Image (cartoon, rainbow, N blue to C red):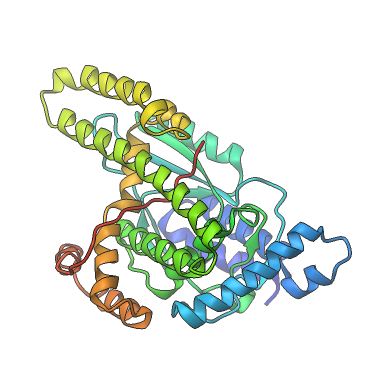
């Protein structure tokens, strides 16, 4: 099938749950990523490839093998090609929430169900969409996204590629990114973003530490970065809980209470969450709402991994067994597992 015909088919198939304009850019944007991708061996053989990039690409192929052989993640052609998009993000996600609620606005998509974000391949268009939502009264954030998963359905077009947007991450974070996106291909539940993202975050954390087990310096650097992220999360979770309590109070006090909470968090961030000051400076309800999608269930998945004897195949199978359950039953069953608590989340300093 030609790319032009494929684009037309994808646009028609995907237009049923949103505007034709959004799905047209989504289809053409993804095809643009695929067109830019080249097999890793071809990039390595190219004399124009910088030595540092060649080294990173070789490392990713070892990580890719490790993911399938040691973490029971899918064995397919994803992350066997590389694309330089000549931009800092692959897509920009628009997220929105009401002025006095932490409930995300959702958009529904074929294949993946509904999610609390809408992705755009053009930053200017994403900003225009954000401005339109602000005009409707929503609080909005536009977030740069370094990678996304097609849940495996694009493997017949070459699979999801490695991208310049994350290829130079520190080793532990690079491994975490690859393992996170492959986890979405292993288990994905339509209409349950917190479940999907928390599972993938647990996989990235456990998988990266397994990858770095015999690299003490790199493991120490990874753990130090994640410890800083946990300090950020602790302050953000506190803020989220305080905002939820304020929004449950009298309507006439909500605006001032919200302003006071945000001011307090911004004042404390340099001391309690260094490196994340920028996040708190621009944080709004959309920021706190999307944050919960990534950390809400992570400790439960980590306990499940322990309950399954730290056996990756059993762990993934146990997660997959939760798919047919209702959302509430899925959480109740997941939280019935036992083991130590530990939390993590993707935002990086300055994001």
- Lateral position of residue 66 relative to residue 88, left or right: left
Tell me where residue 191 appears, x and y as whole percent.
31, 61
Residue 154: image quadrant is bottom right
Residue drawn at x 49%, y 61% as measured from the top left: 176
Quarter of the picture containing the N terminus is bottom right
What residue sits 11% from the left and 27% below the top? 249
195 lies left or right of 329: right
Q: Is there any visible trace of residue 295 in the rendered image?
A: yes
Which residue is more in the foreground, 30 or 239?
239
The single residue placed furthest to the front in the displayed view is: 216
Q: Position of residue 95 (x, y in %)?
A: 41, 42
Q: Position of residue 180 (x, y in %)?
A: 46, 63
Residue 134 in the image: above or below residue 144: above
Q: Residue at x 63, y 68 (%)?
A: 60
Which of the pair 56/192 is nearer the observer? 56
> Is residue 166 positioned above or below 45 on the image?
above
Q: Residue furthest right?
A: 47
Q: Position of residue 250 (x, y in %)?
A: 10, 23
- How many numbered marks does the figure carry? 0
Foreground residue among 233 and 12: 233
Which residue does the image show at 37% across and 59% down from the upper left?
197
- Residue 105 shows in this picture: no
């Amino acid at each position: 099938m030609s790319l032009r015909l494929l684009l037309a088919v994808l646009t028609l198939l995907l237009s049923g749950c949103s505007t034709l304009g959004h799905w047209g850019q989504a289809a053409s944007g993804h095809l643009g990523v695929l067109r830019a991708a080249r097999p890793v061996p071809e990039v390595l053989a190219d004399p124009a490839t910088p030595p540092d990039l060649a080294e990173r690409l070789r490392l990713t192929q070892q990580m890719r093998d490790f993911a399938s052989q040691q973490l029971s993640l899918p064995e397919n052609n994803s992350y066997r090609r590389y694309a330089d998009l000549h931009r800092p993000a692959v897509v920009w996600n628009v997220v929105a929430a009401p002025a006095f609620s932490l409930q995300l606005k959702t958009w529904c998509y074929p294949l993946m169900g509904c999610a609390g974000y809408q992705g755009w391949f053009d930053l200017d268009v994403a900003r225009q969409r954000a401005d339109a939502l602000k005009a409707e009264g929503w609080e909005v954030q536009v977030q740069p996204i370094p990678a996304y998963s097609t849940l495996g359905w694009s493997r017949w077009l070459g699979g999801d590629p490695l991208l310049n947007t994350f290829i130079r991450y520190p080793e532990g974070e690079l491994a975490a990114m690859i393992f996170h996106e492959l986890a979405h291909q292993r288990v994905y539940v339509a209409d349950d973003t917190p479940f999907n993202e928390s599972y993938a975050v647990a996989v990235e954390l456990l998988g990266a530490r397994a990858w770095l087990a015999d690299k003490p310096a790199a493991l120490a650097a990874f753990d130090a970065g994640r410890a800083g992220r946990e300090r950020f999360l602790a302050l953000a979770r506190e803020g989220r809980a305080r905002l939820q309590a304020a929004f449950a109070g009298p309507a006439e006090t909500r605006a001032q209470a919200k302003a006071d909470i945000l001011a307090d968090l911004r004042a404390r961030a340099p001391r309690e969450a260094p490196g994340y000051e920028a996040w708190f400076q621009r944080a709004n309800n959309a920021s706190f709402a999307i944050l919960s999608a990534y950390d809400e269930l992570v400790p439960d998945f980590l306990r499940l991994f322990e309950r399954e004897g730290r056996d990756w195949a059993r762990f993934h199978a146990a997660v997959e067994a939760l798919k047919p359950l209702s959302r509430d039953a899925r959480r109740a069953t997941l939280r019935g597992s036992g083991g130590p608590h530990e939390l993590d989340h993707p935002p990086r300093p300055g994001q």
